[in-house]
Amino acid sequence: MSTNSSYVDSLLDLYKEKFSDRSLTNKVLAISSALDVLSKVSQSFSQKEGEFLQNLYINFSNESPNDIKILDFSLNFTHPEYFFIPRFLETNINYFYNDFALKDRIIAHQNTFTGKKNQAISEFLSGSDKDIVALYIFIENIAKNYGDFCEDKELKHAFKTKIVKFYDALYKLFEASSQNLVKEYFNLTLLNQPMLLVEFVKSCLLSDNILSVVALFKDETRLNLHLEDGYFMSLSDNLLLEFISVVAVYNPNLTICFYNQSSVSILSTIDSGEIRNLEDFSQKSAKFITEFKPYPNASDENSTKCIYASLFFEYVLKYKNNNLSLNTLYMGGVGSGKYNKIREILHIKNVPEYRYRFITLHPGYDYSDIMDGFVNGVFVDGAFKQMCKRAILDSQNEYFIILHNIANCDINSVFGESFQLLLDRYSSTNKGAFVQSKNSPAITAFDENKKEKYSVLLKDGVSCFAIPSNLYIIATYDSNLGFDENWALFSRFFTCIKLDCDYTKIEASLEGVKNAHGFVKICKKLNEFIQNDVLNDSNIEIGHYVFLKIKEQITNDEISDKVLKEFFDIELSSILSSIFAKFLTYQESRKAVNSAKILFKLS
C-alpha cells in the first residue's frame, strides 16, 4: 500500500497555515465536549429508567407495527399549549434547558400558543420552527410519562435532566462535526424511540468491532429517517456509517475518522487503494492518523487525533469541492489573499505543474504574448494559446491558467476575439465553439506540419482558435483600483468572488502577542476610515496579509506605539498614498494619509 506523502505534506502545510493551534483546539473541544456528555449520559440511565424506555418502545411497537405512534408525543400531540404556560415555561427553561443549544428558539414561541387549544403543532407551524417545538414537546412528554411510571418527582427530574442533556449533546455534536447529520437531526430525534438512540450511542462507544454496530442497526434494529405514506424509512447506508463513525471516534477500542463519501475519496487519494467498506476505511484512517499526525504534538488521546484528522479532511473537502466556475475572478484589496487562495486550490486539487500556468499581467503585454504572432520574424504561440492547446489534447483532465492582476493590461487588445469564447467553450458536445483569430490566415498559409503545430483546431483545413471546457481561467483583480469600464467587462464574463480582510486570521496569527486584539481593532478602524470617511466605497481596503507584516517588527511579544508608527511609515503609508491618488487630489491624498496615521494608534 503506497502513500502519497508529498501530496499530504503540501496539504498539511496549507492546513497549518490556515488555522492556528488555538482555533483548531476550539473546534476539537466543541466535538470532544459533546461526545463526553453523550458518553456519560447514555451510560448513566438507571435500571428503572432503562426499563421505562424499553417498555415505551415495546408499547408503541405493539400498538403500531410501524412504530409511528411515537409521533403522538411530538408532531401529532394536540395540547402543546400545556408546555408553554408562561410560569411553567420560565421555570422549565431555567431549571432544565439553561444550556440547551435550541433554548432561545424554544423561548421565542412562548406566545405562539396563546388562544390555541387542541391543535397539533403541524397545523400552524412549519419548517425549523415546527421541528424545534416538536422536539421540546417530545422531551416533555417522555419526561411526563416517566413521572407517571416511577411516581417520584425527584426521580422524574433526574431522568428529565438526562434526556435533555442527551438530545442537546447530540445536536451540538452534529453541528460541530457533520453537515449531513445536522440536516437530519430532527428526523433522527423525532422519528426514533429514545431507547434506540441511547442504545445506538452506547454501542458505538463501547463495541470493539465497528462492523457489529453496522450489522445491528442496519438490519434488526434499524434507525428511522423519513416518514413516507405512513411508513418509516430507514437511514441510508452512508448516513448510518457517518453517524456511527462520528460517535465511534470517542471509543477507546477504535481508531476511525468521520466517514462520508468525500472522506473515502480523500483517503483513497492519499493512500492509494480502493476503499470497499467501513473496515477498509477504518484501517486507512488508523494508518493516516499514525503516520501524518495533522494535530498539535501535545495531543495524545486517540479520540482527539481522530477528530483532528477528520477536521483536516473537512478542510481538504472544502477546497476539492470548491465550486469554481470556468471563469473565476477573485477580487480584493492588496493583501487580501487572492494569490494564496488560488495556490491553495491548486494544492488541494493536486494539480501537477504541467496543467497550470501563472501569468502576471502588466501594461507591456500584447497580443503575441497571450495569443500568437510574429516576434523578430518567428511565429510563436502565446501563453494562453499554449494552455488551450494542451487542454484540448487532454480533455480528461482539468487545466488552469491564472491571470494575475488582469486589470494591468488592455484586455481587448491582448485577448482580442478570444474573449467572446469565454462563455462558449469547445467540447465534444459543443464542437461549433471556435473562431478564426487575427492570425488564422497566416497560420492557414503555413505548410501542413506548421499549420497543425500552431493551430488549436483545424476546420476544413482552416486554422481556428477555441477555449476548451476543461480549462479553468482564474483571474485576480485589485478592487482598490476602483470599478471602470474594464470592470464591467470582467463582471460580464467572470464569476466574481470577493475576498475581504480576514481579521480573525490576523488575531490567530498573532497568538501569544499580548495586545493582538487591540491591534486587530485598529486595523479594522483603519479600513473603516478608508471606506466610510475618505472614499465612501466598501470594496476598497487593506488586506490581512499586509497587516500581518507587523510580525517582523514585534519584540517581547508586544506591539508598542513605536512599532505601530514604524509599521505605518514602512508598510502602510505608500499603500494608502497609492490608493488615495486614484480618487483624490494630491493635497486631499496627503491629508487623508496624515489622518490615517493619527488614527493608527493603540493608545
Image (cartoon, rainbow, N blue to C red):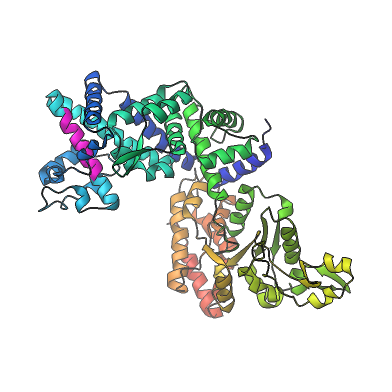
Asked if 125 appears above or below 79 in the picture, the reply is: below
The magenta stretch spans residue 144: yes
- In this view of the protein, which residue sits in the foreground, 172 or 192? 192
- In this view of the protein, which residue sits in the foreground, 30 or 136? 136
Asked if 529 appears above or below 251 in the picture, the reply is: below
Location of the N terminus (image quadrant): top right
Q: Percent x, y for residue 554?
A: 55, 49
Residue drawn where x is 53% and y is 60% of the image: 543
- Span of residues in magenta: 134-146
Q: Percent x, y for residue 108?
A: 22, 51
Asked which quadrant contains residue 355, the reply is bottom right
Residue drawn where x is 69% and y is 76% of the image: 417
Report whether 440 appears left or right of 349: right
Report whether 526 appears left or right of 423: left
Q: Percent x, y for residue 307?
A: 48, 34
How many marks the image carries: the answer is: 0
| Residue 313 visible in the picture | no
The residue most toward the top is 47
